[in-house]
Image: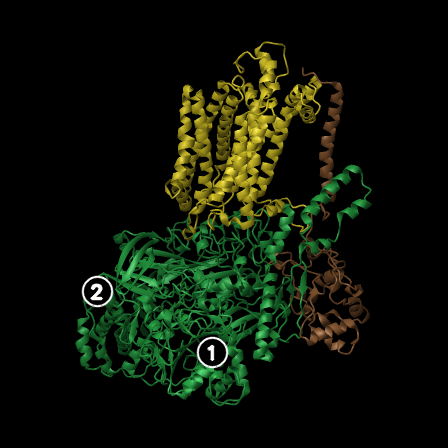
Amino acid sequence: MAEILITGGKSAADLDADVARPVERFPTRIWWVCFLAALAAFGLGALLATDMFQRGLGVLGLNITNGWGVFIVNFVFWVGIGHAGTLISAILYLFRQRWRTGINRTAEAMTIFAVMTALLFPVIHTGRPWYAIFWLIPYPNERSLWVNFRSPLIWDVFAVGTYFTISLVFWFTGLIPDLASLRDRAKHPVRKAVYTVLSLGWRGSSRNWLHYETAYLILAGLSTPLVLSVHSVVSFDFAVSSVPGWHTTIFPPYFVAGAIFSGFAMVVTLLVITREVFGLKDYITLDHLEKMNKILLATGMMVGYAYACEFFIAWYSGNPIERFALTNRAFGPYAWAYWIMVACNVAVPQIFWFKRARRNLALMFLVSLLVNIGMWFERFVIVVTSLHRDFLPSSWRYYVPTFYDWGITLGSFGWFFIWFLLFVRFLPVIAMSEVKAVIAEENGEGHVAVA
Amino acid sequence: MLRRNATHAINKGFLMNEKAKFKDHVETRESVSGLTQNRQHRQHWRGIEDLESKTTCDERVTEFDQSPFDWIRDSTEMARREFLTIMGAGVAMATFGCARRPVHKIIPYVIKPEEVTPGIANWYATTCGGCSAACGALVKTREGRPIKVEGNPKHPLNRGALCARGQASIFDLYDPDRLKAPLAGSRTGKRRQTSWAEADQAIQTRFKELAAKKARVRVLSGRSGPASRRLVSEFLSTFSDGEQIEYEPLFDDEIVEARRLCFGHPSIPRYRFDRADLVISLGADFLGTWLSPVEFARDWVGGRKLPNAPNALNGPNALPVKTTMTKLISFEPTLTITGSNADERFAIRPGDELKVALALAHEVVKSAGIRSSSSFAKNKAIVNLLPGYTPASVAKEIGIANGDLAIKRFASSLVRSSGRSLIIGGGPQSQTSNSLALQIAINLLNSLLGNEGVTIESDAGTGFADRKVGFSAVSKLIAEMDAGSVDALIVHGANPVYTIPRLFEDALKKVPFVIVMSEYENETSRHADYVLATPHPLESWGDAEPRPGIRSIQQPVIAPMHSTRAFEDSILLWTEVRRPKGSSWYDYLRSFWKNDVFRSDREWLWEETLRTGVFQSTPARAKRVEFRNSALDRLGPYARTENSGLVFSAYAKVSILDGRGANNVLLQELPEPTTAITWDNSLNIAPSLAKKLGVAENDVLELSIPHHVVELPVHIQPGLHPSVVSAALGYGRRSVGKAGDSTGVDLYPFMTVKGSARFYSGQTVRLRKTGKIYRLASTQWHTVAEKRPIINDITLAQYRKNPAASIHTEPELRPARPGQKLPTLWPEHVYQGQRWGMTIDLNSCIGCGSCVIACQVENNVPAVGRELVRNSREMHWLRIDRYFSGVPERPDVLFQPMLCQHCDLAPCEPVCPVLASVHNDEGLNLQVYNRCVGTRYCENNCPYKVRRFNFFDYWKSYKTTMNLAWNPDVTVRSRGVMEKCTFCQHRIKGAQDQAKDNGKVKNGKGYVEDGAMKTACEQTCPTDAIVFGDLNDPNSRVSKLSRDPRAFRVLELQNTQPSITYLTKVRNKDDAHG
Amino acid sequence: MHGAHPENGVSLKFHAKLLIALVITGTAGFAAFGDRKFVVPSASNQGYAPEQPIPFSHRLMAGNDRIPCLYCHTGADKSRHAGIPPMNVCMNCHQVVKADSPYIQKLKQLYNEKKTIEWVRVHELPDFVYFSHKRHVLKGVSCETCHGDVARMDRVEQVAPLTMGWCLDCHRGKTAPPEVLSRVYPNQQNPRGPVASTQCDTCHQ
């Protein structure tokens, strides 16, 4: 045994009990509070969005110079969040990082919900989503017209779409054995029926396991390149354009690093909560979280490097407009946003050099929150400060988000947490089957197929 | 669900043209009824092509042509499919119930007039009613509905061009706030609508009484045409004491008076800018607002044009043929477009123009002496007067650093170009207690230099001698009214209560009987017994005599839309003079022209004049005018003291002018060329003064003179004298309409009256901080070009050395010469047929903004209102960027019309996900509105930021009659759609259509000859700065110009390869041959 | 490990299959019927034949009496709009022809009152489409190509879908009538190829 992944000498039975408890018990008050809060937030967002659709995008802070604002910031932010999941479940899986078993289920769930949230924004930011949806997927093709495959936005449609589908299937496949065990534990007929259908007739026979393993491996292989592709493509939205501050080759790696950074931060945030609320301290151990924090530290520095690199490139390019754009970021009207970003993403994570800090729950929770904020501002800086002062000084303007921008942003968080809370309510937050394997090993029992 | 909304959006949004037409027809119908009373033969204006009428939702459901359930009944499909289909059907029912296109009606003519073919425009020549300059206009009508006013190429004044006000005047016609019927009892406060019959009844009886007794009747009107004047005088002759007074608030009485004193001939002379090599303007904004700006701009720019074609082909270093330019020097208190276009400009205090003039005279006399032939020889007055005005002393007084050298320089160039120079002055901004003296000094200078009769022509006629014109006449009237000796007053085309505050209002209360005839309710009409609604100039007959020898006809192009009656028709009705029964103003006008203008019975002359819109005769020119030395006595005495403290200077904006355009949304939203401010007037102060006072942009200051106090938001304006504050007249209207009321602050109350003279500027004012803030709606926040390769201006000296000289020499800023192509990833476009392009000569562009309005009217570009301009959502497809360079005290100003560059490698095209932004085979960069989903990616990626997004359904703000102004050839955009300049693509299509009919075809398309088609902006440009044409034709004007050594493109480093080429501005700064 | 009861195992298998089957058939069904307007509604009014205020019969006028289209629709070769004949054109003949018919009476009455008939519009394109009758007529496209065999219709019906795809097919030469093709490609045996511009700005401006 290289390391202890599960503490408290748990048995498989304990595990089932511990993990299934929140699912089978009547939801706690705290769950209801959170759920209603999320519902309210989403309600507000939905309300504002509906009004926006009726009156027009003028209710937002956008103007003729700032064509994009908070909505696109949110899109990139959420897609970024969605990264950690696949990374953990796929790449770590392929690398046989067994410590992932404690966290991968939550991470994957988060991925899916994050992508669902992200997908809201490109649709509503057109102000007439019925067109956006209808003409980006032109079928039936009554006008014998197709979409513009040169446009990064179309690439987005495919990249994010694929990513979502694969992640979903991957996640569901992983769930099947656990659903089966929930089915078997279920008393209430309805509950039983539902889990029965969902678990697709899993009986845990070795034949089942064989197919399962193969499928899981294949899916992991499939989704690995996606981890890199999605955010690269998203970064093309900017890199392919000619806007100073956007038009740079470093964007794809820069965005991927940032995405993993923010993704892991979000995972930490959620895990700290879940393990507290559902008393899963023995399965989501401090070791797990410490590992996550190490990744945060590493990716944080990558991001920091990217920030520095942008400046170098701008200076090195000799393009005065590019140079101005970058100087304007750090010292222009939006300097405040820029320095919030730098502080949160580069400075704050440095604290994880200390083991003490890495293992301090309160601290890591705070840091992960700050990183999330910082990463949101990174996208804000990229989108807004590059646009508001571009080529012709005559069209320089200032962008101020309105109540609608903020309200709908809040709504997106509501939307995300609605799903997440439903997840923790109805599905096992820990990959039981996989953890069992680990337990089995640690308790030195007979060999079970290693997840 | 999505789909239902989609179909709805289509119906709602894009059916707007239909709606427009629909409303149009309803209106036109009303108008017909109004019109049939007037003249039967005009009946064909029942311009009804088709009429839409919406049906209710259920009706449409019954028309649902295919019920899915029938299909299911016959269906023998397998069960699961069937289930799915029912699902689909359910969705369809839910989504599709109401989505069917609404039922439209088609309403044919009863009797179709021959000249009207639905879909084909008719043009009529008339006279522009935008201001008193009376330019010639051509009006485009569709199905009897005027949709555009353009300059009349045959008219000698404007020669096809038109200013912003003229272009926008079409919106006044459709203004929903116009008077729609006569009103009675305004002054008593019990205002009520009345009928014409009732009003006439009352008025005529009143006039009968007045005619009986020795009554004093006065008619106060704006500048009106000869026929109208004659008619009024006939009318007044029926009373024992009748007088007609003409008053234009911005009219320069001093010029007339000074010419009476100096030459015994009270008149406004003809200024021949086309003959002048050197123009010195002492405050006169002749390019923007003074007298006849379009005419002047056209004349003046003739001497500014630099040659292109011949030397352009010989590469950049070939010397140009012509290296001289008319030089413009300007001394002015506030920054106008004239000053902005001056080669050398000096900010001075209002009132100091006189000192400059005399200093110049001093130098001229000193250096050149006085030609013994001239009447000044051995003239005591001059000899005594001038020595006081050495350049040194004057320069010191007016506070211009080494101004003495400048004045000396100018004087010597004046002498050098004697007889080819022109000194002018006037306009509100320099209208001070010195104005009369200034005009005399100007006359003196021009006479000294022998410009009289060459660059200044005055006709032999009596000028204004037999007319009561200007403030002196009005002040006399006010005196009479005050004395209570005026029995009846008719006000028409003037708004004295607003433009002569207090004085006139008080006096008016003492007049027992007041009739106001006006298109709008206005400040004056509030004090009238009867307010009679008059039609818009486009609805009524009239004539004008802009200057001796030019007579133009104003003919109606649409039947009166409301129950209005022409001023002249009313007068005719009330006149007791014997005249054939039922003869109308139209008949009167014809007979007047027959007897007084044509002086012949040939009928075709009238028809011909109606067609061309103008009748010319050569006026007898006065023989060499002699300067009367007696005038010089009037030069002094006046304050030589250094006037201390802050001085106020009022001026007129090109858009609002004296306030007549106040209810015109287009004009209100036209950014002032020099300040970029819309919808309000601001208190302009120099940066140095702002620093001294410690105020910032938008701070509200209290501005006070002894008898009046106002609060104005500050605008920090380079190019102002540190002790001058300036603000625009014509704002703060109290009762004109929704758009005009409560815009800005009224500054007419600052007008100061001295004897029979009034002046707007020169008052010493006091400023006080209020701590309030008012956000001015500005369309440009940053006015420095940041050394970017956007604009290019060089001096004439540099141009002589190298016509291709550029201020951007860095290779990364100008990687390519025009025409030279840089490598690109995308496949190159090939253009078999014609390829459209444009050149804009920054050396000709004066920034007057007429192109902006022309574009708006032509392309259905909405005005969005103050709040949205504040949020930077103005919709102008064509905007005019202004950049300042040099020191804030004496900035160089550059105007740059910025519109879609129709790039060959357009950044907007590859990024649009739905191919709404596409390139066509003529080099046009198209925006397909109905395809656009509104991602705004193109907008972000456009380096020129010329794309405009519809944040709201702006067409909804177009109420009732305003919907008639839509151009049916251009789609009305709904919200969520991106739009931008199309190079007037619909005009191109029209021209190609005609070309095809004439058999001129090139690879499947009509071949448009060079100049056969003009874009709206090009067509109206007073200085021909914009040229549009075929770049594939090496001999077209546009391709010649784009090969000019001065040619450059904006942001060449982006390699967007624009179709628009700009030509470097050349400043005639060096003095050699100025 | 997790004991699973065989019988519900069976039912489970079925559930699983059903789920997959549903997904597949769903996709297939949409693919097959997606273009039917009741699945995804279409903006086309094909087959629309509303009742008119006066049952004017093109079959009589254009069919039996052989009155050329351009006699009434005078704008068709001059302007974008073909135009609906003004009342006076109707009255030219009907002052005498069938003057006693009740409908003509109605017509006459309206005419004398200087009123007009409000016909119901059948063929209509959205406002953002700028279609020119003139260009098509002058190119030799017969009226029937788009309006169907009006000469056989008692009540006019929209025969063609008048959708953008339909327009483009003709412009691209796929469905262009032979006479037009041979006009565009005079010296070809059986001409093929585009007959008109397919640039966006040909119809959208």
- Side of B902 relative to A190 (left or right): left
Say which colour chain B has: green
Q: Position of residue B719 (x, y in %)?
A: 31, 59
The answer to whether residue A429 of the structure is visible from this angle is yes
Q: Nearer the viewer, mark 1 or mark 2?
A: 1
Q: Position of residue C77 (x, y in %)?
A: 68, 69
Q: CA distance from mark 1 to mark 2?
A: 47 Å
* Amino acid beneath label 1: Phe
Which residue position is annotated with label 1?
B567
Say which colour chain C has: brown
Say which colour chain A has: yellow
Q: Quadrant of the N terminus of chain A?
A: top right
Which residue position is annotated with label 2?
B643
What chain does badge 2 belong to?
B
Q: Quadrant of residue B422?
A: bottom left
Q: Position of residue C135 (x, y in %)?
A: 66, 65
Task: Name the colour scheme.
Answer: by chain
Q: Which mark is residue B413?
A: none
What secondary structure is marked by label 2?
loop
